[in-house]
C-alpha cells in the first residue's frame, strides 16, 4: 500500500477490496485511497494549513526547477492533492495563471 | 443520537470516545468522593454547636489537606494528559477526508490515489416531513467511513466559522475559513452517527446536521464508486 505498509498474501489470494467490490485489479489500484501524507515535523499541531500550502508551493518550485516529468515532484503533488480542499487548489491555480500568486516561485 | 431524557453520554462510536467515557467515570468517582466527604464534614461542623476558641492553627491538618488534594489532582492529571496527547497522534492514519462547511450544509471530499478521481458529496438537511421523526438530524446524503481504520479529518470552511461535531465519536473541530484543522477518528462499529453544527453561522445554523455511517471497507469502496 502506498502508505508504506507491505502486505504479503498467500498464493492466489484475492485482496478484499477486489473480492467484494467486483472491480478488476487495475480498477482497484486506481481507486486506492489509503494514502496519508507522512507526518511532517514542521507542522506537528492541529493547524495543517501551512502543510497543505507548503506542499503546493514545493511542487510548483520543483516542477519549475526540474521539469514536469521529474518523478520526485510527484511526492509534493500527491501530498497537496490529498491535504488541500479542491476550492483552494483551484483558486491557487487561477492565481498562478493570472500571475497573482502571493509567493515568488 | 440522544434519547429523550438522556443525561449521560451517547454510546461510544470511536475508540477515543470510549477512553473519554472511562476518564469521565474515573474523575466523576473522585469528585463524588470528595463532595461526600466535604458535605458530611460541613454539616457536622455547622450542626455541632461546639466552638474551639483556641484553635488558630494546626500544622498537621493543614499539611494533610494540602497534600491529599495535590495527590488526587496528580492522579487525575496523568490519564488526562495521556488522552490529550493520544488524540493528537496522526502518524497512523490511512485515509484523509476533507470536511468543508458552507452556509448551510456540509460537504466531504475524499481523494483517491489516481489524481483524476475525487469523491465529493454535499449533505443538506432533510425537511421535517421527510425526516421520519428525527428532525434536525437527517441529511439527504451522508458520509461513509470504514470502521477500524484511522482516518485523518481535515476541517475547513468556505464562508464563515462552523464546527463539525459528532458527540458519539468524541469529535469536534472548528471549520474556520482559510484554516485546515486536523482531527483523528477511528470508528469502532457499524452504525449511523449524528451531529450538528456547533458554531453560530447564520440563520440556518441549527439546520445543518452531520450524518456519518461506519461501514466495512468494501462497502466504503462501493460507496465511493457510486459518487
Image (cartoon, coloured by chain):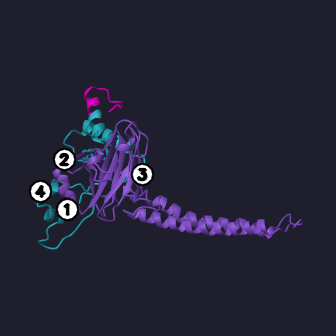
Decide if residue B220 is in sight here.
Answer: yes
* Residue for point 30% across, 55% down: B212
Quote the CA–CA distance across marks 1 and 4. 16 Å
Residue at 18 percent of width and 47 percent of height: B117
Of the image marks 1 and 2, the number of the one nearer the N terminus: 2
The residue labelled by disc 2 is B117
How far apart marks 3 and 4 lie (CA) works out to: 37 Å
Q: Chain of mark 2?
A: B
Q: Position of residue A27 (x, y in %)?
A: 12, 55
Q: Is residue B108 visible?
A: no
Circle 1 or circle 4, nearest the eye:
1
Query: What label does residue B50 carry, if any?
Result: none
On the same chain: label 3 and label 4?
A: no
Residue identifier under label 1: B218
Magenta stretch, residue numbers:
A93-105
User: Is residue A78 in the magenta section?
Assistant: no
Numbered circle sitting on residue B172: 3
Give how far across and how far down residue A79 sits, in percent: 29, 47
Q: Which chain is mark 1 on? A: B
Amino acid at each position: 500500500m502506498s502508505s508504506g505498509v507491505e502486505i504479503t498474501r498467500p498464493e492466489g489470494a484475492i485482496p478484499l477490496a477486489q473480492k467484494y467490490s467486483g472491480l478488476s485489479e487495475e480498477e482497484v489500484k486506481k481507486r486506492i485511497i489509503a494514502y496519508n501524507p507522512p507526518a511532517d515535523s514542521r507542522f506537528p499541531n492541529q493547524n495543517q494549513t501551512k502543510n497543505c500550502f507548503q506542499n503546493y508551493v514545493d511542487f510548483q518550485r520543483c516542477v519549475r526547477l526540474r521539469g514536469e516529468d521529474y518523478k520526485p515532484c510527484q511526492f509534493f503533488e500527491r501530498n497537496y492533492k490529498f491535504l488541500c480542499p479542491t476550492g483552494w487548489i483551484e483558486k491557487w491555480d487561477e492565481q498562478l495563471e493570472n500571475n497573482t500568486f502571493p509567493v515568488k516561485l | 443520537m440522544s434519547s429523550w431524557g438522556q443525561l449521560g453520554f451517547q454510546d461510544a462510536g470511536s475508540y477515543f470516545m470510549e477512553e473519554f467515557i472511562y476518564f469521565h467515570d474515573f474523575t466523576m468517582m473522585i469528585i463524588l468522593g470528595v463532595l461526600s466527604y466535604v458535605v458530611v464534614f460541613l454539616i457536622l461542623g455547622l450542626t455541632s454547636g461546639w466552638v474551639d476558641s483556641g484553635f488558630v492553627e494546626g500544622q498537621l491538618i493543614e499539611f494533610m489537606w494540602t497534600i491529599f488534594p495535590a495527590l488526587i489532582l496528580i492522579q487525575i492529571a496523568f490519564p488526562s494528559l495521556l488522552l490529550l496527547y493520544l488524540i493528537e497522534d496522526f502518524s497512523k492514519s490511512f485515509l484523509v477526508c476533507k470536511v468543508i462547511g458552507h452556509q448551510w450544509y456540509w460537504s466531504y471530499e475524499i481523494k483517491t490515489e489516481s489524481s483524476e478521481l475525487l469523491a465529493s458529496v454535499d449533505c443538506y438537511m432533510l425537511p421535517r416531513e421527510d425526516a421520519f421523526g428525527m428532525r434536525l438530524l437527517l441529511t439527504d446524503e451522508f458520509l461513509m467511513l470504514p470502521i477500524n481504520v484511522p482516518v485523518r479529518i481535515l476541517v475547513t470552511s468556505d464562508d464563515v466559522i462552523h464546527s463539525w461535531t459528532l458527540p458519539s465519536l468524541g469529535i469536534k473541530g472548528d471549520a474556520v475559513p482559510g484554516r485546515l484543522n486536523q482531527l483523528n477518528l477511528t470508528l469502532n462499529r457499524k452504525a449511523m452517527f449524528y451531529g450538528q453544527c456547533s458554531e453560530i453561522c447564520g440563520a440556518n445554523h441549527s439546520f445543518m446536521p452531520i450524518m456519518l455511517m461506519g461501514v466495512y471497507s468494501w462497502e466504503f469502496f462501493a460507496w465511493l464508486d457510486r459518487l
